[in-house]
Amino acid sequence: MNGTVLLSVMLSFAISVMLGPLVIPFLRRLKVGQTERTEGPESHLKKNGTPTMGGILFLVSVVVTSLLFVKEYPKIVPILFLTLGFGLIGFLDDYIKVVLKRSMGLRAWQKFALQIVVTGVFLFYLQHYTDVSLAMKVPFMDGVYLDFGWANIPIFFFIVIGVVNGTNFTDGLDGLASSVTVLVATFFTVVAIGTNSGIEPITCAVVGALLGFLLFNVHPASVFMGDTGSLALGGFVAATAYMMQMPIYIAIVGFIYLLEVVSVILQVSYFKMTGGKRIFKMAPIHHHFELCGWSETRVVAVFSIVTALLCLVALMGV
């Protein structure tokens, strides 16, 4: 067990680190640069032209590492599928935006339809090829599960797609989504090892791959993950939680994802209801803190600290 954990972390980390100097210059040559919004924080304008689609680095690392363990640990298959499936949706969106130069990327209905399809296939696999139940463990209540019967299915779609888009909104500052998610992945790794769930190779692979990616993604970032990375990470978090019947725990360890998506919903809703007034200076909420005077690195540090503390709380509730 210890050998598997160490090997998967180190191998994934090494692949991610080695791919960086190869992939980043290639992305620069493709001119897949990020375009920052002029209405955003002024400090972000200097990021224009920074290569995006860097999620390829850790996505390849996770896939290669996981495939080495898939025979011995078959439960990583559905997690790998959802991670890769959402990553491919993000890649398609990024490719259309930055390579084909169509600023809108995938249309909203196209992206949503693809997310429904990928989530549906994941659900079908869970129900027909695993013994995983959609009943959800209740934190701090040992042996207590919430089971809503037929309603588990719409709840499943709501949680998976909500987590994926929450992770996507979190990707807005150098190292933010990476730092938060590496802590969430570490939490799931600890639980997976402690419960002998059989998914630890892929949770460890994500930890290693993100640590490697952070070498290139911390401020000032030399590459952004793009939707390729953020959607893939959301798929990983949602799939891992459901494989361990722990989607409720996402509200604790993934509080930052929830905060980001709720801030956008509140901002848009209030803007429409009041004819142009805003709750926050800018949404998602990490930009609000920036416009309040926080540095980018401070926002990332605070959000990461909050996530680390909440992961400890969640561990107490397992």
Image: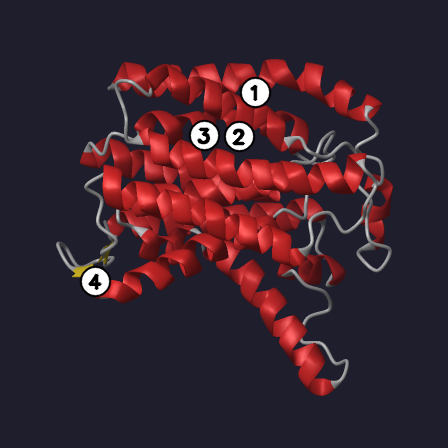
Asked whether the residues under the numbered discs 3 and 1 touch, taking CB atoms below 8 Å apart as contact, a structural biologist would say no
Asked whether the residues under the numbered discs 2 and 1 touch, taking CB atoms below 8 Å apart as contact, a structural biologist would say yes
Residue 14 is situated, as x and y percent measured from the top left of the image, at 52, 14
Q: If you read the primary sequence from the N terminus, does the residue marked by circle 2 or circle 4 appear first? A: 4
Question: Mark 2 highlights which residue?
Answer: 210
Question: Mark 1 highlights which residue?
Answer: 16
Question: Mark 4 highlights which residue?
Answer: 147
Q: Secondary structure at mark 1?
A: helix
- Give, as a three-letter code, the residue at label 2: Leu
At a point 79% along the width and 32% down the height, the residue shown is: 32
Asked whether the residues under the numbered discs 2 and 3 touch, taking CB atoms below 8 Å apart as contact, a structural biologist would say yes
Asked whether the residues under the numbered discs 3 and 4 touch, taking CB atoms below 8 Å apart as contact, a structural biologist would say no
* Quadrant in the rendering for residue 265: bottom right
Residue 109 is situated, as x and y percent measured from the top left of the image, at 62, 58
Q: Secondary structure at mark 2?
A: helix
At a point 77% along the width and 31% down the height, the residue shown is: 51
